[in-house]
Image (cartoon, grey):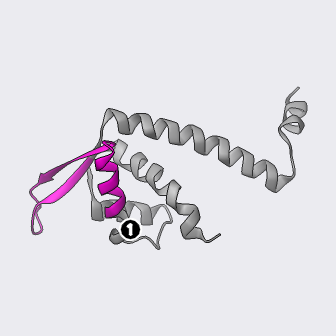
Amino acid sequence: MSTTQMMKGILDGCLLAIIKDREVYGYELAEQLELYGFDSLSEGTIYPLLLRMQKEELVTSTRKKSTAGPKRKYYSLTTKGEQELEQFIQRWDGLQGNVNRVLKHETESDQIQERG
């Protein structure tokens, strides 16, 4: 499985997490993701995801004046988007824990015994 395939579901959650903090525009999202180490992502990858999230009512957009050129489309989370982000975090925490257990050859019962 390629990194791209693994990233498909993860990117949505990452975008929602960035947008949660403040309104951001598409290029700025690409820059933020790059700061977190996602350096192979382009705006061409991000905009279709934002469009789909907007159709799913997870984000809304507003056009605002820009100091450099045409108006920019700024994205913000909806209540539904906030709920989706919380669900993503729960799923991610569970998945991360499961993968780490496999990589370390630990079962859940091994961890429970260690705690007890």
Classify the position of the C terminus by image quarter: top right
Indicate the secondary structure of the residue bearing disc 1.
helix
Residue 96 appears left or right of 26? right
Residue 57 appears left or right of 32? left
How packed mark 1 is, by other alpha carbons closer than 10 Å (few <14, some 14-19, many 20 or more), is: few
Instruction: Locate residue 60, reporting x and y percent.
Output: 24, 45
Classify the position of the N terminus by image quarter: bottom right
In the displayed structure, would residue 108 be above or below residue 9?
A: above
**In the rendered structure, does residue 108 fall within the stretch colored magenta?**
no
**Residue under the point 10% across and 69% down:** 69
**In the rendered structure, does residue 74 fall within the stretch colored magenta?**
yes
To which quarter of the image does residue 93 belong? top right
**Residue under the point 37% across and 39% down:** 81
Residue 110 appears left or right of 46? right
Q: Looking at this view, is 75 or 115 the one in front?
A: 75
**Residue under the point 50% across and 60% down:** 8
In the displayed structure, would residue 88 be above or below residue 47?
A: above
Residue linked to disc 1: 45
- At label 1, the amino acid type is Thr
**How many tags in the picture?**
1
Instruction: Locate residue 44, reporting x and y percent.
Output: 34, 71
Instruction: Locate residue 30, reporting x and y percent.
Output: 36, 65
To which quarter of the image does residue 110 belong? top right
In the displayed structure, would residue 90 be above or below residue 37?
A: above
Residue that lies at the very extreme toward the top in this rendered image: 116
Residue 106 appears left or right of 28? right
**Residue under the point 16% across and 60% down:** 72
| Span highlighted in magenta in the image | 47-75
Instruction: Locate residue 111, reporting x and y percent.
Output: 85, 37
